[in-house]
Image (cartoon, rainbow, N blue to C red):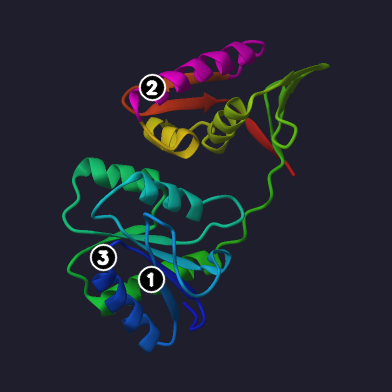
């Protein structure tokens, strides 16, 4: 991790955040604290963050929303979650939000920095993600910008939610799409009402995909859904 990387420390505990910030600054890195409730911070602009440390001891919608934001297309940065003694469900939920690793507290700051450097190195060695404008699978062509699903000469206009859900399915093609991850990514909250709403959209997408028997959305018990197909990218 280079000495000019901007680290955002996402914590309600200003004491912990301050200690981490001061340690990183002594090592020559920029670091600032963000309040997860208000999103307020002082220092460099959010778009210049290059690493995030997230205090996960009090999981909340604000934490989920920010963590999802760190992983949006075009602004993906590494995230390490800081925990006490997380339950299996909390660990599963955090990894569904695509954290790159977890560290238990109390922190060993030398180990934390070594961990950050290892994660950062993997990101630096990885090629930048290519810009995907759509997907081709079976007889279908899915255009993200136009929010359309084409089969032959027929063009089907999708709603925003249908587009977002089909995009996640394509991103996880032939792999399980975690149900809670989909809810928290699109609906922001994994409650009963939103789960029922997502089920309705899954039914709608299944009906649209019936025109090609080689394509289907299957249920994965206790996990979520999976788009079964041979997929190509439009770029």
Q: Residues within 10 Å of mark 1 (few under 14, many from 20)?
A: many
Give the number of the disc on residue 126. Answer: none
Residue 208 figure quarter: top right
Residue 177 figure quarter: top left
How far apart in space, not on screen, are marks 2 and 3 (Cα)?
32 Å
Q: Residues within 10 Å of mark 2 (few under 14, many from 20)?
A: few
Residue 110 is one of the magenta-drawn residues: no
Q: Which one is in front in this view, the residue at disc 2 or the one at disc 1?
A: 2
Q: Which one is in front in this view, the residue at disc 1 or the one at disc 3?
A: 3
- Give the labeled residue for mark 1: 116
- Give the labeled residue for mark 2: 193
Give how far across and how far down residue 166 sits, in percent: 58, 29
Front-lying residue, 32 or 157: 32
Reply above or below: 38 against 109.
above
Q: Is residue 17 left or right of residue 119?
A: left
Residue 212 is one of the magenta-drawn residues: yes
């Amino acid at each position: 991790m280079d000495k000019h990387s901007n680290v955002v420390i996402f914590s309600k505990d200003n004491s912990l955040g301050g200690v981490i910030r001061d340690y990183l600054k002594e090592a020559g890195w920029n670091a600032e604290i963000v309040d997860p409730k208000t999103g307020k911070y002082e220092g460099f602009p959010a778009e210049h963050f290059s690493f995030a440390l997230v205090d996960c001891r009090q999981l909340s919608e604000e934490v989920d929303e920010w963590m999802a934001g760190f992983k949006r297309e075009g602004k993906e940065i590494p995230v390490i979650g800081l925990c006490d003694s997380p339950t299996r469900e909390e660990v599963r939920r955090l990894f569904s939000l695509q954290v790159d690793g977890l560290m238990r507290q109390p922190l060993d700051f030398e180990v934390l920095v070594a961990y950050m450097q290892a994660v950062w190195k993997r990101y630096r060695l990885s090629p930048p993600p290519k810009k995907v404008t759509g997907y081709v699978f079976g007889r279908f062509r899915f255009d993200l910008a136009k929010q359309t699903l084409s089969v032959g000469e027929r063009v089907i206009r999708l709603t925003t939610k249908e587009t977002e859900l089909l995009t996640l399915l394509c991103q996880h093609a032939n792999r399980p799409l975690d149900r809670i991850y989909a809810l928290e990514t699109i609906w922001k909250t994994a409650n009963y009402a939103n789960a029922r709403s997502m089920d309705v959209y899954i039914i709608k997408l299944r009906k649209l995909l019936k025109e090609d028997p080689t394509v289907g959305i299957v249920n994965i018990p206790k996990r979520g859904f999976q788009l079964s197909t041979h997929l190509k990218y439009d770029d």
